Amino acid sequence: MRSPHAVPTPAVGASGHAGPAIPAQAAPHATSPARAVAPAARRPGRRGLLKAVAAIGAAGTGLAIAEPAAAAPAATAAPKAAADTTADAALQLLLRRATYGPTVDSMAELKSLGVAAWLQRQLNPAQIDDAPGDAVVKRFPLIALDITGVRKAVEAGTHKKYGWETMSQLATAHVARAAWSRRQLFEVMVDFWSNHLNVTCPSGDVWDSRQDYDRTVIRAFALGRFADMLKASARHPAMLSYLDNRSSTKAKPNENYARELMELHSVGLVYTEADVQAAARLLTGLTVDNKTGLYRFDALQHATGAVKVLTFSHANGTAAGGEAAALAFVEYLAMQPATAKRLAYKLCVRFVADEPPAALVEKLAKVYLDNRSAIGPVLTALFTSPEFAASAGQKVRTPFEDIVASVRALGLGPDTDGGFAGIRALYWMCESAGQPPLGWHPPNGYPDVAAAWASPSGYVERWNSHLNLAAGWWPKQLSRPASLPAFLLPGTLPATYGPMLDALHRRVTGAAPRPQDVTALATFLGKTPTSALKPTDAAVTSKFPYLVALLLDAPSFLVR
């Protein structure tokens, strides 16, 4: 795998191609403020939190959690969630996978509509009134600009040339949309395709085009035909710049985009070097105008002559017809059985299991081909399959998903002042845990398997973020429920600790606790499940944020 960018060295598999790297703790953003800490409040409780997390995860989770002084090896498999025998378990599974985390409102909507109608609605996002999502996106005005608009802002002096303001807003808006858009499945698929057709953000060579790529390629086709998305990507300045096709000429064809178009974007490792060379010649002429930054086809730089790539052949007889020939090749790649199987596999990894059932992959590949690369029918078949229904506990949230799911579980909202400083802080939380949204440097996109994120330092960063969010220490700009205990424990407070802890566990994690989980939580509070509970107890007043953070730390919340 080749990339023109200077990137951290990822883990390399037996084939010699870059594989998923295990993210280390990311360095804080250069301009990020110091993380909020309340030393007197936090230090005494952290060791107890670690012990309690270990107790909750001790039986049947597959996740080793220990105190820092004696850290256990990181897990390499998804932790198994406690079995939930409630009638809502299947609905919770769908919301964990097809959204960025269940909320009270999303659960009520799913129950009201039923699975089939809810899926149909989410697969047609234009039909969803997304006032909350639209309102928060308006806080990021630069991402609405096209390439010409960004360049005009530079000329007017309102935007620094090669500055990253637009890309910074795009990445921050990615967090906001995931947290508060009602078009949840659409946003999940935008993230999926942003990784599959990755163009690193921020990256200096796409300073004027990355936001346009997000809008006109990824978002335009996220639930449409993959073939159309792939062709739009092949003609977008962001992709052509990122993978060097803009500098490819008939005299010196650049092979970078041709290789990744096949290896990463479509058929996979089934090509020869001769195929790469032929594809690179066929793709010459797809370039970017250096004066305007816009896509153009330069017939003068297109290499003519018959080409054969895999089983695709084309006379490619004229320079003027070069663009049509190149797009025919891209359409061919999108409709290949190898592409169908590869995309089906990746979708199953995202939504079903790190090692997905082969039968389901084959089934979805057929659906993909039968529907000419339309993604909606593939997702419908996936979410209604018995394999999906049986997959509870087989996926783990990535750091980005963890932070967003925590925001949703706690009922947090966008900045109260109409700005986005608080939302930007959420981006920094993801960055510190190793996954700044859209920020993966190699062209293969972020990994989506548990082993890639099993970093002790990454978990500690996530735990710190959970406590900051639950306690309201940082970011302070986000809107919060007037009373977190009242929000998470509505109605009359139970008379004893057991029912309260059971209800809180279900509300925060979406899963029913095991008896030993309730006992461990009560022990953390210095109580037993049968201890009397009073409204003035620390468990539902001063210690409540720690209790909530502990549940966000637990394996039952970690599973997707």
Image (spheres, helix red, strand yellow):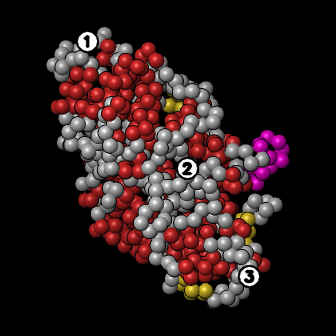
**Few, some or many residues within 10 Å of mark 2 (<14, 14–19, 20+):** many
Among numbered discs 2 and 3, the one appearing first in the sequence: 3
Question: Residue visible at 38% across and 64% down?
Answer: 345
Mark 1 lies on residue = 534
Marks 3 and 1 sit apart, C-alpha to C-alpha, by 80 Å
Label 1 sits on what residue type? Lys
Question: Residue visible at 38% across and 53% down?
Answer: 449
Question: Residue visible at 53% across and 66% down?
Answer: 1
Foreground: disc 2 or disc 1: 2
Among numbered discs 2 and 1, the one appearing first in the sequence: 2
Q: Secondary structure at mark 2?
A: loop
Mark 2 lies on residue = 438
Label 2 sits on what residue type? Leu
- Residue 398: give x, y in percent of width and height: 42, 45
Question: Residue visible at 67% across and 65% down?
Answer: 244
Magenta span covers which residues?
A: 148-160
Among numbered discs 3 and 1, the one appearing first in the sequence: 3
Foreground: disc 2 or disc 3: 2
Residue extending furthest front? Answer: 69
In the rendered view, would you say 6 is above or below 505?
A: below
Q: Secondary structure at mark 1?
A: loop
**Left of 26 or right of it: where is 108?**
left
Q: Does residue 297 belong to the magenta stretch?
A: no
107 or 443: nearer the eye? Answer: 443
279 or 230: nearer the eye? Answer: 279
- Residue 122: give x, y in percent of width and height: 43, 52
Mark 3 lies on residue = 320
Q: Does residue 152 belong to the magenta stretch?
A: yes
